[in-house]
Image (cartoon, grey):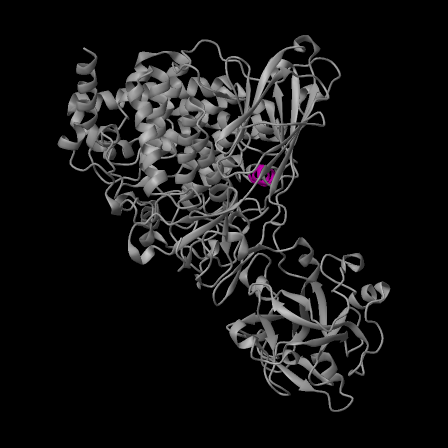
Amino acid sequence: MGSLLGFLTLWWLTAGTVVAKECTNIPGQSSHTLRALASRKNVSDATEFAEGNKMLVPFPWEKSSGNVQPHSTPLTGGLGSLVNDTLREVPLHHVRLDPESDEGRAQETNLRYLLMLDVDRLVWSFRENAGLPAPGSAYGGWETPGTELRGHFVGHYLSATALMWASTHNDSIREKMSLVVDALAECQEKLGTGYLSAFPSSYFDRFEAIEPVWAPYYTIHKIMAGLLDQYTLAGNQKAWIMVLSMAKYFLSRVESVIERFTIERHWNSLNEEVGGMNDVMYRLYLLTEDPEHLKLAHLFDKPCFLGLLALKTDGLSGFHSNTHIPLVVGAQMRYESTGDNLYKEIAEYFMDLINTSHRFPTGGTSAGEFWSDPNRLGDSLTTEAQESCTTYNILKVARNLYRWTRDVRYADYYERGLLNGILGIQRGEEPGVMIYMLPEKPGTSKALSYHGWGTPFDSMWCCYGTGIESFSKLGDSIYFENDDAELYVMRFSSSSVLWTALGMLVTQKVQPLSSESPVLSVTFVFKEIDEGVSGKGSSLSLRIPSWAARRSLHVKLNGLSHFHPAGPGGYLTFSRMWKAGDTLEIEVPLSLAMEKIQDDREKFSGLHAFLYGPYVLAGMTDGDNFLGEVNGTSLSTWLVPVPASYNEQVYSFSQLLEHSFESVSKERTTKSSFVLSEGAGSIEMRSEPKEGTSEAAYSTFRLVPTSQTTASVQPIRKSVSSPRDVDLRRALQEDGTHSGQYTGSNYPILFGLVSLEPYSKPGKRLAHSGPNSKLVIVEEAESSKMENSVREFRLVSGLSGDENTVSFEAASHPGCFITSGLDPSITLRCKQKDDSAYDLRASFSVKKGLSSYHRMSFWAQGEKNHFLLFPIYAYKDEKYTIYFNLTSNF
């Protein structure tokens, strides 16, 4: 009987592959980018916005000395998961991120963005569609009136704000999200059928007739999921009634299609993107136990796609990735709702496929929104690779598998995808500036993809929606617990968690990683907050990542060393009676690693990415990715840490110049700041660039003391008079370093002999070939053949006599200085007489470097060139390369 049921299930799952016209999305109709182009319209300019409150609100129980219980939203009834021995995430209400951590700052940036958004503008199209007064104007981008996907971002906003409320208990965000729910409730009531959207229901007539329309169920899923999150996370009863009404309405529509046509017509309609309709309906069923909700969930399980996975067939090629990953998430919820093990196996097989043949090192997948053939990623190294939405959704798959299995491999995947594919989609701490794709093409940048960086009010892409959710729930995959009150730490992330079963507040502090110290140091401190439940014993299990070096862990409990046999890919478990004041310290050794591109063709055999623990190291390059012959078995011999102290040696040098070679004004009398900059092998003056750009990196140099300099370059931080201006002369004279005269020069020496190394081109130097020669960047091979003196300069007080200025005197030609001219080039010119104009052109203001070395920076010393590498998440607009070409035998 069991085998017959299994056969019938497989038959049902795969039947669509026979009767359906096409088991995929039609490429021209499924690409979000193409459809956005087709429906684009202009909207009004963005309005002024106000920054939000700070995110981190103390735990409620920290505000009182009494035993105040934390806020949570109790849910009555509900089926609950049918999966046994599974982990549950610790509720976001019980987790707080350290605001000084990378993740804490990312969450704060997102909170500011959520609070910037105006309620009337968010719901404008909903009100217009319901025939209600709609003050103000709609947002732009994919929320523009007339864009068929309008309303999707509002659904994401409901989820993101509910998650952010749980993560912070920020009162302003709670007030704003409640106003959005209230406005949408008015729209639903006015429509009177249970329907709610920003577009008319006629879109579903087209959907059901298999006529082109841009994914109406995709938007409905976002709205329903958002309302459900508002109920489960924030206890909004109005949102609960609204989502139940929507479920009733759409079940009626689907049943009508099946009755009027056939089930085949419905399956065919699922070739259009429907988001995670199966997922949200299974979630609803887990709460209501209503068989009608289970029925509607089943009807959105796309048979022809899930059937391929059930048969363990790699048929991903050609499928639109972000259409189908949510279907797998929904299949996982089917497993939790029904206990049907087939759907667990589907998810496991899917993740195996992604991990072994469709994954970039950053954890992302797909290119141009679609999957390629297995083990053919070499053709996917484009600017339009790794859609952010796909990373957001596939992390859900990995997270569920981890909860069910405790398998560290899934946690490894989650961690890598989050740190490399999610954290870096924000542009630093600029609220509302995110990317759609994470480019994989050598020499590209996040700013140079088709979409580039979005804007707060006129983008609203799908990846903006998933982005605001991702940065609202960074704390949801750190801590898990089981029915025995055991606490699992899946990720090392600075945060605090309420261990309710023990009445303990556990604070986890992670020391920032550095390339110089390959050890992840983590400390857990225990604080009692509820005497009524204290005195209980339980287990704390720490995941030891697979990337950990195979060296012994260093573990201390209350200051005493403990030996533990746990190794990479396992758990470090402590079972004891925990008490207030307990301290657990752990040091996890890291190692460098290489990962070959998932492409089995010979021409791509040399492409490798580099990782430092879970972090993907991207190289700052314009496209050159040739490392050549290196030792592939001993990375540390040529992939070397950049000392943190080198940040005390990086500077930018500028002049206030008339616009003689940049026509800004007709009179050419306007003065602006220009910086010494390298590019295309030469040195010239360029307009001062924006931070976080390749141009900022090109305008940063390291002052390298030469062999004739008796003291190293000294730190100058103590003389910084503003974030950028530096009184270099006073700082060095206070240190007693090379002040006064110096042999061979008639000018006060500040540093003695130095060479200038371009920040983005380690190992190279600025050089000249004598008086009146232009400065160039010397290649490593050429440098070894030249006299040292043509690369060395005496750093002297600025000839102009102005404060905070320096001049560079050629060591080989005393009296000759680096000077700017009437064109952008920089030339070595000799001073002939008292000439104030010459003195100005030879004097440069000193600033802290426009770029600096990330704490996890490395130099890759290749066969011909050296490259600066640091984590991909830290890049903004700088050009980078992820895969490098090696010719070594491994």
* Residue 359, x across and y down, in percent: 37, 43
Q: Quadrant of residue 295?
A: top left
Camera-nearest residue between 530 and 255: 530
Q: Quadrant of residue 746?
A: bottom right
Height in image: 17 above or below 682? above
Q: In which quarter of the image is residue 97?
A: top right
* Residue 269, x across and y down, in percent: 22, 32
Residue at the spot x=37%, y=18% of the render? 336
Height in image: 832 above or below 820? below
Camera-nearest residue between 275 and 615: 615
Residue 505 seen in the figure: yes
Height in image: 297 above or below 429? above
Magenta: main secondary structure: helix
Indicate the quadrant containing the N terminus: top left, top right, bottom left or bottom right: top left
- Residue stretch in magenta: 105-113
Camera-nearest residue between 437 and 158: 437
User: Is residue 112 rendered magenta in the image?
Assistant: yes
User: Is residue 434 rendered magenta in the image?
Assistant: no
In this view, the residue farthest toward the left is: 18
**437 relative position to 825: left or right:** left
Residue at the spot x=38%, y=13% of the render? 82
**864 relative position to 386: left or right:** right
* Residue 420, x across and y down, in percent: 49, 44
